[in-house]
Amino acid sequence: MSVIHQYKLSSGLILLAEPVATARSLAMSLQIPAGFAQEPDNQQGVSAIVEEMLFRGAGALGAKEHSDALDRLGVLRDTHVASVHTGLTARMLTDKVTDALPLLFDMIVRPRLDASVLEPSRDLAIQALDALEDEPQEKVFEHLRRRHWPQPFGRSPLGVREHLKALTHDDVHAFHREHFVPTGSVIGFAGQFDWTQLKDQVEQLLGDWQGQTQTPATCGQPPRGRMHDKVKSTQVHIGLAYDALPEPDDQSLLQKAGIAVLSGGMSGRLFTQVREKRGLCYSVFASYVGHKDRGAVLSYAGTTVPRAKETLEVLVDELCKVSQGVKQDEFDRAIVGMKSRLVMQGESTGARASAIAADQYMRGRPRTLAEWAQRVDDITLDGLNQFLRDHPPGDMTIVTIGPEELEGQG
């Protein structure tokens, strides 16, 4: 990979671009400081409403005209809401970039946000809340988010039903006006491009964008502990979380290596010990989630009622046992898996555009794949085992969904 180009626009927006020699397209990831943690306390869900309305007309074009214009250019696009950002991602052929960028940027800077589309957008947001009842695994992580993270970061990206119903057209416009701003925004590109041409066009289109917003601050302590959501079911869904290093910490890569030992495919400890050897559950995994100032290890197991108590006990035991050390063969598999994922990310312009934008926010600078690969190569078995001994799991937040509350470990 080549050096990543960097430029700060007149508006304060940070522009990054990484060339990918084999690509014939260009991917974009624009992150705006308009996440659910920035929502007013009594308007939880407004970011989801605004996200939906971004697709319903922008600039001088109505919803269908704007959508048709992007479709004619073959632009693939999507949006998402996270805790501190609303993101717009897109992929386009290189020869369509000049025509596509004005249409894409209009979605962020000049969305129509017409009053006539508020009710359809509200209906979709409420339907997403209703659908959560049919997705118990997702619901477990919603509960974990609320119990483990401090507010406002523990909120649900889906919002609160009563808040969604009460939102007004003025509320939607106010949230967009206050948080869709250039200061704190980052745009990453990856693929084939002419840097001077790309930089000049983005400056021309977004150089006079104005505004800044406050970074959300934590409020109070999360409840944590244990929680049971009683439902009639033959299945039990178990989720747990414990604190880990924040993403910018250099040792967070060791945390990820430890998780790769636990949950690196069918050879990972959790799959082997909880599912394969004991047959306790049909699904089990762990993952690391890193934010700018906090991190956590999350784990999930889905099982049947008779096996739920033992599943929880073995899951907690395996998560704790890894701090006693890993063996050479486990280490080798984990490192190969991490490097394989890096190679696959390098082959995806979309993944690289998102990665360098996230790096800029988290660390204040983007990192090339070569830098990432070197850091993985620098991990040693002794270094990983020392880290795991020094950072055993702490107090766990445990959530269960099923007919009866579980007793036992945790």
Image: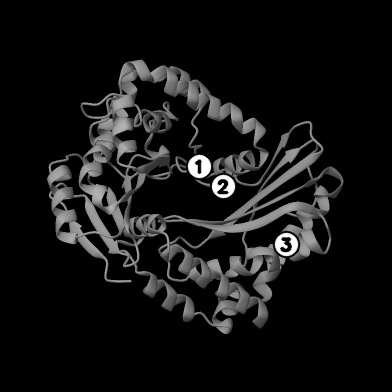
With respect to residue 401, does 127 lie above or below? above
Mark 3 packing: few (<14 Cα in 10 Å), some, or many (20+)? many
- Residue in front for this viewpoint, 97 or 227: 97
Report whether 118 appears left or right of 19. Answer: right
Amino acid at pointer 2: His
With respect to residue 294, does 124 lie above or below? above
Dots 1, 2 in contact, CB < 8 A = yes
Residue at horizontal 50 percent and vertical 21 percent from the top:
162
Image location (x, y in percent) of residue 197: 15, 56
Which residue position is annotated with label 2?
A: 148
Of label 3 and label 1, which has the lower sequence position? 1
Amino acid at pointer 1: Gly
Residue at horizontal 83 percent and vertical 43 percent from the top:
305
Residue at horizontal 56 percent and vertical 75 percent from the top:
335
Image location (x, y in percent) of residue 124: 49, 25
- Which disc number belongs to residue 51? none
- Compute the Cα span from label 3 to label 1: 29 Å
Report whether 322 appears left or right of 368. Answer: right
Image location (x, y in percent) of residue 171: 33, 23
Q: Secondary structure at mark 1?
A: loop
- Residue in front for this viewpoint, 258 or 323: 258
Q: Viewer-nearest of labels 2 and 3?
A: 3
Which residue position is annotated with label 3?
A: 271
Mark 2 packing: few (<14 Cα in 10 Å), some, or many (20+)? many
